[in-house]
Image (tube, rainbow, N blue to C red):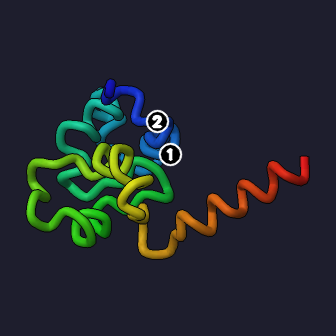
Amino acid sequence: MCSSDLSGLFDWDWYMERNADIVASGADPLKHWLSTGWQEGRKPNPHFDTSWYVRQYLSDSSDTLNPLLHYIHCHASMDVEPNSEFNTRKYQIGRASCRERV
C-alpha cells in the first residue's frame, strides 16, 4: 500500500489547523505525521486518536508500527476502533441503512 494514500484518513486541513509548528516549519504535513507525528501522539484526523489506539492495540510494538497503517490493514478483520467513542459496526450499519433509503 502506498503510505501517501492512507485510504483518505489523513485530513490535511485539520492536521495543519491543529499543528501550527508543522506549518511554520514548512514540513509536508503527511510526511511529518508518517515519520514522527504519530510517535508524538498527533492525530491524523479528528476521529483517530493515535495515543489511545497505540495503548489499546499496539502496546507491544508501539515504537515501530504506525497505528493508522495498522488500522487500515486490520480494522475490517480485527474489529478495531479508531478511538474510545467510535463503534465501527454501528457506523457501518448506519451507512448501509442510509444507502437503502436512497
Mark 1 secondary-structure assignment: helix
Q: Is 56 positioned to the left or the right of 23 in the image?
A: left
Give the amino acid at mark 2: Ser
- x and y, in percent, of residue 18 in the image: 43, 51
Residue, far front: 77
* The disc label shown at residue 46, or none: none
12 up-or-down from 28: above or below: below
- x and y, in percent, of residue 53 in the image: 31, 64
The residue nearer to you, when weighing 33 against 57, is: 57
- x and y, in percent, of residue 88 in the image: 53, 63
* The disc label shown at residue 7, or none: 2
For image coordinates 49% across by 59% down, the residue present is 47
For image coordinates 39% across by 64% down, the residue present is 80
Q: Do the residues labelled 1 and 2 touch (CB within 8 Å)?
A: no
Q: Nearer the viewer, mark 1 or mark 2?
A: 2
Residue, far bottom: 85
For image coordinates 41% across by 28% down, the residue present is 5
For image coordinates 20% across by 55% down, the residue present is 40
Mark 2 secondary-structure assignment: helix
- Which of disc 2 and disc 1 is earlier in sequence? 2
The residue nearer to you, when weighing 77 against 44, is: 77
Give the amino acid at mark 1: Trp
36 up-or-down from 46: above or below: above
User: Which of the image's four quarters has the N terminus?
Assistant: top left
Residue topped by disc 1:
14
**Distance between the alpha carbons at the discs numbered 1 and 2:** 16 Å
Q: Count neighbours of disc 1 (C-alpha within 10 A) and say few if under 14, some if 14 to 19, many if 20 or more.
A: few
The residue nearer to you, when weighing 91 against 28, is: 91
- x and y, in percent, of residue 48 in the image: 42, 57
